[in-house]
Image (tube, rainbow, N blue to C red):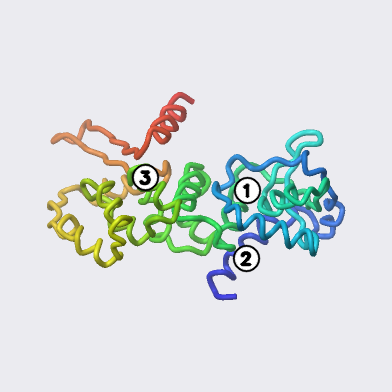
Amino acid sequence: MNKENSKLGRGLSSLLSSKKDNQSESKNFKKINTSSIKANSQQPRKRFGKNEIEDLAASIKSQGILQPIVVRQKAENTFEIIAGERRWRAAQIVGLHEIPAIIKEMNDEEALQAALIENIQRENLNPVEEARAYQLILKDNKINYESLSNLIGKSRSHISNTIRLLELNEIILNYIEEGKISMGHARALIGVPDAVDLAKDIINKKLSVREVEKNTSKYKNKKPKKNLKDPNILNLEQELSEKIGLKTSIYFNDQGSSGSITLYYSDLDQLDDIMKRLKK
C-alpha cells in the first residue's frame, strides 16, 4: 500500500470504527433482509457498470459475500448503506434474501465522508462524481479544504482542480462521466469559449490531450490584467469560496465604505442550493 492509500485507509478506519470499544462490533453484526436496505442518496458514486455488477454477482454466487457491508439504521427495519452498495446490488441479482452487515452510528456528514473515502480508495469515482462529492462535503462549515485534504490524503490543489471541472457545461460533464473524454481533456477546456464544440471535436477526431492543450493555449496564455486588489480582500475571497464551495468576488467602492459580493454558479442546481441556504 502506497503512502497516499495508507492515509486513506487510516481515514476510512477512523470513520468506520465504532465510537465505543471495537469489541462492540460483533454485537453490531447481523444479517439484514436486502429489502430493508436502501442506497445512500448522497452516495458520491452514481454510475454502476452493468458488467461490473454482474461479475461481482457471479463471484458472490460462487464464494458468497466475504466482507459485510456497512449500514446505519434510519428507522425501524430500515437501513441505509454507508459502504458496500456494489455488494448489495450484486446480492439482489443473485437473489439473496439476506446480506451480512455491520451497523454503525453515524450522522449525515460522517456517512458522506466514509462513502467518499471508500470510493476514492477503490478508485470507483469518475472525476465528476469526485468533484461533486468534494463540493458537497465542503458546504458543511465544519470542514474546509485543509481538513478535507488531511482526511482523504489528497492535496488541496488536487481537490481545487477537481472541483473546477464543475465550471464546465453539463454536456461536457456527461462526456467525462461516460468516459468519452478524459480529465486531462476536460481541464484543457475550462475557461475556453465554445468548449462544447471543442469537446465534440475531441470525441469525433480522437484528439489527444496534448493536441487539445495546443488548440486552447491562445486562451490560456493571455496576460492577466494587473490585479489591484488588496491582498486582504483576496484572502477574504479565498476563505469565503472555501466555506461555501463556490467561486466568489468581493468589490469595494473607491471610498471603501460599501461594495458587493458576487457568487458564481455553474448550473441551476447550484443556484437552487444558494437560494435554499439564503432562505434558512
Answer yes or no: do the residues labelled 3 and 2 have beta carbons within 8 Å? no
Pick the front one: 84 or 157: 84
Q: Residue at x 77, y 39 (%)?
A: 35
Instruction: Give how far apart the Cα atoms at labels 1 and 2 are.
Output: 15 Å
Extreme residue in the top direction: 279
Q: Which residue lies under the disc numbered 2?
A: 9
**Which structural element holds mark 2?**
helix
**Which residue is found at the position 44% from the left and 32% from the top?**
273
* Placement of 239 over or under 77, stated as above or below: below
Say which amino acid is labelled 2: Gly
The residue where tag 1 is placed is 110
Q: Give the mark, 1 or 3, whose residue is nearer the N terminus.
A: 1
Q: How many neighbours does mark 2 have within 10 angstroms: few (below 14), some (14-19), or many (20 or more)? A: some
Q: Amino acid at mark 1?
A: Glu
From the viewer's perspective, is 104 left or right of 131? Answer: right
Q: What's under tag 3, amino acid-wise? A: Ser
Q: Position of residue 153 (x, y in %)?
A: 52, 64
Locate the N terminus by quadrant: bottom right
In the figure, is residue 265 to the left or right of 223? right
Residue position marked by numbered label 3 in the rendering:
241
